[in-house]
Amino acid sequence: MQFSISRSKTQLPRLPASFVLGSIVMLVGAGSHVAPVAADDFAGWLTTSGGYESDILVNPNLDPYTVPGGPFLQLDGGLGWIHPFGGGSRAGLSGLLSLQGFGNDEQRRLMGASFEGDAVWRIAPRWQLRGALGGSYYNDSVQATARRTGTGADLSLTYLNRGLRLELLAGWQGTRYPQLLRPDAAGVWGTYTESSSFIAPAILLTLSQSALLRVGVVAGRTDARDPLYDSDQLTGRVSLWWRLADGLWLLATTVAQERNFSTRAPGEDRDRYGQAGVGLEKRLSARVVGEVRYTFSRYHYVLGGEDDTHRFAVGVTWRFGGGETEARLAVAASQPLATPRAGQPWRFRLRAPGAQRVALVGDFNAWDPQVQPMRLVGDGWWETELTLPAGPYLYAYWVDGVLVTPPDAQRTVDDGFGGRNGLHEILP
């Protein structure tokens, strides 16, 4: 089973660094879980989109300046590389680039770029440890003071079980605004910087073959050069992916954040941000996905006043790399599955002579190819076994980064993306 996870395209320069990092971390975590990448290979994606975004009024009670919106065109792209090690561990590199242009009087242009390197260690059959280092750059042509560079690191511990993924992540990020000057606590002026630390527990539930739910919280603290901007933040995010029909998914996300500024007077020490988005995603082919999305955002400022923004976008994503055709052709045969009873070993054998890496994935291991790798036993045959309680189970084979319909299944069911998953029932 594969889900296509779209990344948020909206650039909101007034969001604090810890909130942006926390949201990206949760999105990347979800994406890496439900969309396996090719083993020891490069893969990538390219998105073209267009739509309309309303103006953003910067603090109506203090600064009447308006960040112009209007019709826009956007290009997003990403590249990733992953190298597996023994025991389900791996290392990877990824990079993202976003370019956006508005058709307004000021011809607003936005640019965002980020990169990340990470390593995952399988420390137990259902536990993994992940460490990552990354950096980012952002520039807005109509807001010179919004230009920023950042760097950060995070460490997460994840538990994987049948249809369940629990993650606890902690990290740090530093952000520098080269064209923005602020005094420090001693009154000395200099380039404005922020240092943010955060902790982010999250849960991902495979509710059924047709629904995936993710709930996450980010709690963080920001220490700024200007003490007026020292703050504590709490952000919550809920995301739902729900299959409406074959190849058609509903995507819904809501985000809420509150910041408290410890050095400001009561009544001027709190601001809030909320966002809700809904979209439809349709798989047009094995590598092409179309999407329609609407996002509503509301800001409540420290000195009072609120501002609402609206964004509507239509886009198409192309994915490339991963050797999909070669992987499907590599699966030559498999041995019929015996029907085990509950508590008895369930043995899988698959012949994939040209494969470099094969894993068993399903709703019993959160569709994670790191949990149940298959071993090569000779003449192109791969095998593994596991023991499960009674009940029906959906599964597939993961061959060099591509999900392949099991030829040994009792029967198969549509996966919603033009392929089929195996369905096997264990008797009591």
Image (cartoon, rainbow, N blue to C red):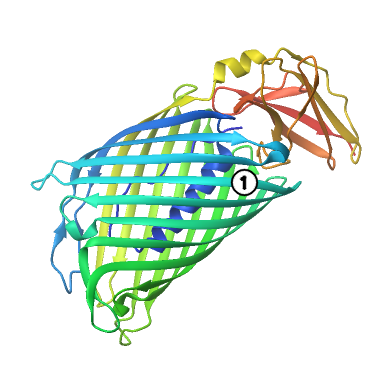
Q: Quadrant of residue 421?
A: top right
Q: Quadrant of residue 275?
A: bottom left
Quarter of the picture holding the N terminus: top right
> Outermost residue toward the left?
105
Label 1, secondary structure: give it.
strand
> Outermost residue toward the bottom?
265
Expressed as whole percent of the image width and height from the top left, the position of residue 43 reads: 48, 29
Question: Residue at 66% of width from left, 15% of height from top?
Answer: 330
Residue 164 left/right relative to 63: right
**Which sits in the foreground, 343 or 115?**
115
Give the answer, above or below, for where 363 lies relative to 149. Answer: above
Give the answer, above or below, for where 80 lies relative to 252. Answer: above
**Which sits in the foreground, 243 or 266?**
266
Question: Residue at 35% of width from left, 69% of height from top?
Answer: 272
Question: Residue at 13% of width from left, 63% of height from top?
Answer: 65
Question: Residue at 29% of width from left, 76% of height from top?
Answer: 226
Q: Is residue 363 visible?
A: no
Expressed as whole percent of the image width and height from the top left, the position of residue 266 reads: 33, 87
Residue 116 left/right relative to 58: right
Q: Residue tagged by mark 1?
A: 120
Question: Around disc 1, counting alpha carbons within 10 Å, would you say few (fewer than 14), some (14 to 19), or many (20 or more)?
Answer: many
Expressed as whole percent of the image width and height from the top left, the position of residue 85 reads: 66, 37
